[in-house]
Image (tube, rainbow, N blue to C red):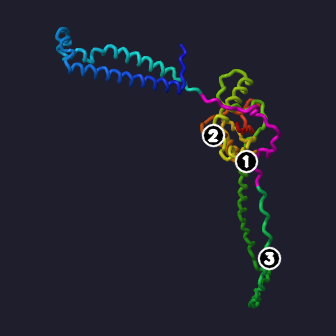
Amino acid sequence: MDISLSGGALAGTLAAILLLFIVMILILRNVYSKRTEKALQGEYQAADNADKSYLANRAKYERLDVFSLSSTFFNFGLALAVGLSLLAFGWTQYSQEIFIPDGALDLDEEIEMEPPRTAEPPPPPPPPPPPVIEEVPEEELIEEDPPEFEDTSIDEQTIEAPPEVVEEAAPPPPPPPPPPPPKPKVDEIFKVVEQMPLFPGCEDLGSYTEKKACADKKMLEFIYGNIKYPAIARENGVEGMAVVSFVIEKDGSVTDAKVVRNPGAKTGEEALRVVQLMNTKDLKWSPGKQGGRNVRVQFNLPVKFKLE
């Protein structure tokens, strides 16, 4: 048995049950009020004296005994509990229908973009400073005493020892210059690869074609399910297509998101917010592959804003 109730139908059913309770309470109250008046007037005295039942010891007036309907109320409460349980199981929350415009992933023209930079070239070294010419002051001539001459003449009897030759040790060679620092490794960013990145949620499917179609559908449902038309754009009737460019890393995260086309009126900022929401909700893409390895891929996402 298929029982499905929307929130409005469930609320209406509960309101009807509550109204039935109120009507039943009012009817029983009215009935027992009338019986009480008749009992006070003595209309039930002769009947109660003639009918000596087991209730004679418990109630003064048998017709005013509320316990006589206990089995009826118990059965009614049991049926009501079963009915409420069925209503609770049949309550169905319907997901809101997401409007996805036709050709949501089609770009009507080529987007002129700056090619992704994989590595910034180092800046050129600064030019050497010009040489500074310093003026050397003229030194004053200092008068020195005339040198004294010694007699160094040698005769036959003079024996002069040869001068000692002192060998000086050679200075140690200078240390080798330090090696240049290694260049930072920056992975290349691709625009087209063998297997493009896929939005999460379709990993259990078989072929890549099926995964691609399912991933595109999931991505569009995520984008247009979280997009909020800016109030300023709605008031001024602004429509158009915003394009957000971002890079899908090797681990599936989204980086370097920026707006490359903005129709204005806060539409580009709203599209960028939804793209950045992927990282906020920790949604990891299946990374792109080139030659069997994960690579960084640039992705251009068009987001169309159209007033209904």
Stretch of the chain drawn in magenta: 95-122
Q: Which of marks 3 and 2 is nearer the N terminus?
A: 3
Q: Position of residue 212 (x, y in %)?
A: 72, 27
Q: Residues within 10 Å of mark 3 (few under 14, many from 20)?
A: few
State left or right for residue 176 relative to residue 36.
right
How crowded pointer 2 is (Cα within 10 Å; few <14, some 14-19, many 20+) is rated as some
Residue 137 in the image: above or below residue 280: below
Q: Main secondary structure of the magenta part?
A: loop
Task: Name the residue type under label 2.
Answer: Leu
Residue for badge 1:
264
**Secondary structure under badge 1?**
loop
Which is nearer the eye, 122 or 213? 213
Residue at left offset 74%, top offset 73%: 161
Please check the rendered image and state whether residue 108 is part of the magenta-colored stretch, yes or no.
yes
The answer to whether 225 appears left or right of 194 in the picture is left
Q: Which residue was labeled with disc 2?
A: 277
Residue sitting at x 73%, y 36%: 295
**Quarter of the rendering containing residue 168:** bottom right
Q: Counting other residues with Cα less than 10 Å from the Cα at mark 1, is it few (<14), some (14-19), or many (20 or more)?
A: some
Q: Residue 210: x percent and y percent?
A: 72, 23
According to the picture, the residue beneath numbered tag 3 turns out to be 133
**For the residues bearing labels 3 and 2, Cβ distance under 8 angstroms:** no
- Looking at the image, tell me whether mark 1 or mark 3 is earlier in sequence order: 3
Amino acid on which the number 1 mark rests in the picture? Gly
Residue placed most toward the observer, 85 or 146: 85
To which quarter of the image does residue 45 belong? top left
